[in-house]
Every structure is written in C-alpha cells, then in structure tokens.
C-alpha cells in the first residue's frame, strides 16, 4: 500500500519548522532532545480526544497482551509498567497524520532524507503501574542499523517527574561500555535491582506542554518512573529508521516466529522494503 515514496503534503505549519541548531546538537551529543510546540495548539486540541478514545477502545486487547508478556517473563499476576496499543496508524487517520507530521523533524535529527516507519504506539500508564525499566529500543528491533529514532508525544501536559515523563541516560547511544555494563552486571558482582531507576537517575525534559515532543536515539538508555501524581498518562510514539537497513536473523528461540512476523514476509538479509514499512520522504 505504501511501497513507493510518499511525497507528503505536510500542510501543518508546525511540522515544517526548521529545527534549531541547539536541538540538533543536543540530539547528536546526548541522544535525546525536545522540540517545543511541534504540534500546533489547534491540531492538538482537536485530535488528541480521538487518540484518547482509541486507547480506551483497545484497553482490553492491550491488557491481554501485557498479561501475556508478563507471564512469559515469569511475572504472572504482577502489574505491568504500562498498556501499549501497537500501530494505531493502521486504523486511525489521526495517528497516521501525526506520523507524517513528525517526519520532517525526524529526518533532520537523523540527518537523512528518507526514512522507514518502524512502528507507532499509544501508551497508557496509570496509578499502580510499575516504573518502565531502563531499555534501548534497538535491542528488540530486528533490523541492522544505528539510524533509529523515536518521537514521544504526551497527550496532555506533563509538568513534573511524578507524572512519568521519559527519562534518559545521556550519551549511552555512543558509550559502548553501557551495553557491556548492562550485560555483565552479575558477573561484576553488581545487583541489577540496586541500580538507580528512572525515578532516581537520568535526565528529562519536563515540563512538557501540549504539543511538545521528545526524541531519543534507538540506542539511548531510557525509562519512565511510576506515576505518582495524577490518574493516568497517555502518549503517542512513532519510531523511524533510515532507508536501506537490513533485516537481522532472529535468535533461535521458541518465540522466533512472532519475532519475524513483526516484519511480515521479510527474511534475514532482505532490505526493509515492505508495504508494512512505508518509505517516507518530506515534501
């Protein structure tokens, strides 16, 4: 459906802003940044209620998926860190519009003219949900690339760390020691449970007003504290990667079929040129 390059007519003025040098350098150096007011107030006010309704409509499916994942990880019966609805852009015109509206900034930050869409998501974190542990997006993406970026758009104002913004470990997209440390914690005699979590360590961009967007590189360590202020926190995300990346072979595990099915008919060594991964280029 979207195999060919889309010469998107991105009419929203906000998505055609030229990013500041400070934002570009911030992302290059630290692996994360924020773009203030990227989504116009008019679009935000009219479109966010549509996305919020979509999240609530998919609550049962998202809860079932979270329960399955928690059980597979030996944590059956425990509260998940969030509910996640995958790829709303396939069904919601507003989610697809936001995916396109974020494209120009994503291209500028990665320094490329054409991107593939990896996935979109809607996250719903509520009181009682656990903190989102430190992780790197590219650790679970079956593609061979370093050029990967995620936009995180809260669907309301996030004014403090108690309202569960994303928290980042700066420069971990360039620090190879961070990955070694993560993989060898027990070998080095360090209890992983004693490491500072997102609520105690890292950098964030709050306060985030309506229309603000945070961005993070695919290798940057990030997480989110538990929600301790307010009732819930919702956010839309879109992840992109540079055109031309190759599909990686999955690990030989029982869940390998589901792993490969994320990219549908692609096989290891193929270029990511499938209709489910549209090639996007700003007009």
Image (spheres, rainbow, N blue to C red):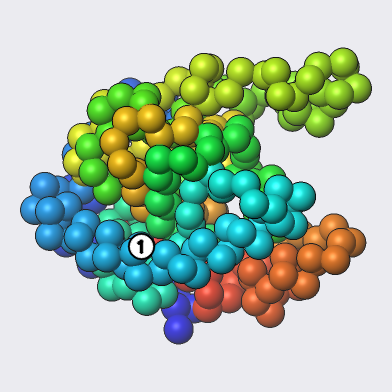
Residue 262 falls in image quadrant: bottom right
The front one of 73 and 252 is 73
Q: Position of residue 270 (x, y in %)?
A: 72, 70
The front one of 216 and 87 is 87
**Which residue is at a point 51% across and 61% down the rendered structure image?**
63
**Which residue is at a point 41% across and 74% down the rendered structure image?**
90
- The quarter of the picture where the C terminus appears is bottom left
Left/right of residue 252 with respect to residue 96 in the rendered view = right
Q: Position of residue 52 (x, y in %)?
A: 27, 59
Residue 263 falls in image quadrant: bottom right
- The quarter of the picture where the N terminus appears is bottom left
**Residue 214 shows in the view:** yes
The front one of 103 and 112 is 103
Q: Describe the element under mark 1 as helix, strand or loop.
A: helix
Q: Position of residue 160 (x, y in %)?
A: 30, 24
Q: Position of residue 254 (x, y in %)?
A: 85, 66
**Which residue is at a point 23% across and 43% down the rendered structure image?**
156
Left/right of residue 274 with respect to residue 16 in the rendered view = right
The front one of 263 and 233 is 233
Mark 1 Cα-neighbour bin, 10 Å: few <14, some 14–19, many ≥20? many
Q: Which residue is mark 1?
A: 55
**Residue 96 shows in the view:** no
Residue reaching furthest to the left: 42
Left/right of residue 269 with respect to residue 117 in the rendered view = right
Number of disc labels: 1
């Amino acid at each position: 459906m979207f195999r060919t390059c889309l010469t998107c007519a991105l009419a929203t003025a906000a998505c055609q802003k030229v990013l500041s040098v400070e934002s570009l350098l911030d992302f290059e150096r630290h692996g994360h940044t924020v773009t203030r007011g990227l989504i116009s107030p008019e679009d935000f006010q009219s479109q966010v209620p549509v996305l919020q309704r979509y999240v609530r409509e998919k609550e049962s499916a998202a809860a079932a998926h979270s329960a399955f994942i928690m059980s597979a990880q030996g944590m059956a019966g425990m509260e998940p860190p969030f509910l996640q609805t995958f790829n709303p852009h396939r069904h919601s015109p507003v989610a697809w519009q936001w995916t396109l509206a974020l494209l120009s900034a994503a291209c500028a930050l990665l320094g490329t003219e054409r991107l593939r869409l990896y996935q979109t998501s809607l996250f719903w974190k509520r009181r009682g949900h656990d903190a989102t542990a430190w992780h790197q997006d590219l650790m679970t993406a079956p593609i061979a690339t370093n050029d990967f970026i995620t936009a995180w758009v809260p669907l309301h104002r996030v004014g403090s760390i108690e309202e569960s913004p994303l928290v980042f470990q700066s420069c971990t997209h360039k620090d190879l020691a961070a990955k070694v440390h993560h993989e060898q914690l027990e070998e080095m005699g360090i209890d992983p449970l004693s490491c500072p979590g997102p609520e105690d360590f890292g950098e964030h961009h709050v306060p985030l007003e309506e229309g603000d967007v945070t961005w993070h590189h695919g290798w940057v360590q990030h997480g989110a504290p538990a929600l301790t202020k307010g009732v819930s926190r919702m956010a839309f995300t879109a992840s992109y990667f540079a055109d031309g990346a190759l599909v990686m072979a999955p690990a030989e595990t029982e869940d390998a079929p589901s792993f490969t099915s994320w990219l549908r008919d692609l096989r290891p060594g193929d270029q990511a040129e499938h209709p489910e991964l549209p090639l996007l280029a700003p007009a």
